[in-house]
Amino acid sequence: MTMQRYECQDVQAVLSGLLDGELDAAASHLAEAHLAQCRPCREVLQKAEETDDLLRATLTRHEAWPSDLERRIRAEVFGVVDGAEAGHRRRRLLFVAWSGWSIAAVVMLGFGVTLSQGWFNTTPMESPAGALATGEGAESLVVPEAVAWVPPVGSEELARSIIEGGLRLIEDEPSLSDPGSGTSREALAMETEAAPVLPAAPERRVEPGRSSFNELALTGVEAEIETSRQLDQWAASLPNPTLGSMPTDDPEPITEEVATLLASNEEVDPADARTGEVLHQASILLTVLEQAGQGSFSDVRMVQQALSSDDVLERLAVARGDLDSPGSIDLVNRAWTVLEWTTGSVDQDELERVKQSIAMQDLPGQLERLRDQYWN
Amino acid sequence: MPLALTEHDLGRLMKAMGPRLLALARGICRDSSVAEDVVQEAFVKLWNTPPDGPEQVVPSWLKRVVVNLSINHLRRRKNTESLPEYSEDRALRHEQRPEHQVDLTDNMRRLECAMGKLPDDKRAILVMKVYDEMSYEEIAAAMEVPIGTVMSRLNRARAALKDLMEADLKHAEADPLIFPLRRAQG
């Protein structure tokens, strides 16, 4: 039966729809008809409109665009601030590359001179440099004291470490190139030794012998600038035996374990098997996150990649809808929240707190125990 | 097929939509630095995983991402800290009044306080509708609720806001210490 007229309480119930223009024609007509003859309801509506206007005005006051926000976004997306900054950085890096090249040349020259002295001052050695390089005949090699300082790496690697150390210093110390801030080669070399070790990024490998030192340095710079994109590719290439790639709506199981489970036991409900499956995946990812190395985000990126490629968050949300125990729902909520957090900007300090939280709650263990209810 | 964005497109979208997105996030989260993080994350997400379809879908996509990130932030923060711009404690509340609020009209100040005191979900839905003028369909998608629920939630949110503002007015009249400026002017 269709309602013929609205009373005050009916108008109150659809007040928002009326204000927002979201009522259908019939309801709108009934409400308008009531308002035409009810002053209190008109006042309520007018008051609500005024509050909306005030709220709009209040929020509009907060419309602003901080000058550095676009720069921060560009920095995160592209790895550089803008063209001018990139050029400035490149020039600074070129300067250090030349410094590194010079240092390397000095080191190699000194090494050559010292080696020559050792060559002439010692006896049974046909080719000490070759022997050092290949390791052949090392037991019979008499190394003169003067060359005992030679580091266990090739000279080119030493030069590269100096250059890359310089690059790190530039990243960490923007004022390094400022006049009077210790830019001498000696200071640079000394500071290089104390430079923090960046997490290893496989993409930065450059085959020795194929680049000059400058090119090597600049290749490193460009790799540094594009670190985020490269790490994504690297994470994508990591072997991950338990997590495959498949659209969410594909009815086939993702993991081999579930495929085997379903094939071997017809009594297992496929929905239960997949619920267990996503719980298991979430457990694995939380374990990876919990054990993520300090200062390295490669583990986090791997988790992000897996979350994205396997739609873990969406499937976890679906699984949560099938749970009936409040405790289980709460557990999945907590796991979902932590995993979802990793999809955003990950701060090192926050990561440490999240790792502690995962460990304290034993989220992976709890998820595995919940998984057992679906797989057994 | 995912949208192909250039650096120029990204810059243009930031200029065109950035301020409104920031106000949207700030309205929901009530925290400027969090709002900036949310907007930054949304644009990074736009670049890394752009939506399918033509560029026309980007504004609503971005709004949805900002709303989701803001709501997720509120969920994470729940039970761990109180809202930064309001305190039940009278003395603290007085101290917490930011300087820039001094020039607000009483109504605006009262509204801001009431918004700060509103439960997160009510505040979020009001900001989405009143400030960002999202349709009920868009709000339903963002909050993962049926469309029919949106109107009743908005009704409750508006009623709660009205009650809070009225309560604040009564509180102010009963205790003029909270409004020293008005007392001085009066």
Image: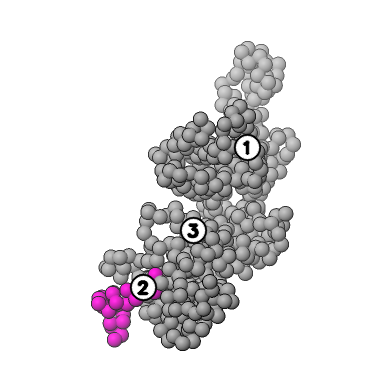
Along the viewing direction, whichever of A138 and A28 lies nearer the viewer: A28
Judge if badges 1 and 3 mark residues of a common chain: no
Q: Which amino acid does label 1 sit on?
A: Ile
Give the magenta-colored segment's residue range. B160-186
The answer to whether any part of residue A129 appears in the image is yes
Q: Mark 2 and mark 1 in contact? Answer it, CB < 8 Å.
A: no
The percent position of residue A327, horizontal first and vertical second, equals 41, 43
Q: Mark 3 to mark 2: distance in Å?
A: 23 Å
The residue to which callout 3 is attached is B71
The residue to which callout 1 is attached is A254
Q: Residue furthest right?
A: A210
The residue to which callout 2 is attached is B163
Is A94 drawn above or below residue A159 in the view shown? below
Q: Mark 2 to mark 1: distance in Å?
A: 51 Å
Q: Which residue lies furthest to the front in this view?
A: A1
Is A260 drawn above or below residue A353 in the view shown? above
* Residue B168 counted in the magenta span: yes
Q: What residue type is labelled 3?
A: Ile
The percent position of residue A243, horizontal first and vertical second, equals 61, 36
Q: Nearer the viewer, mark 3 or mark 2?
A: 2
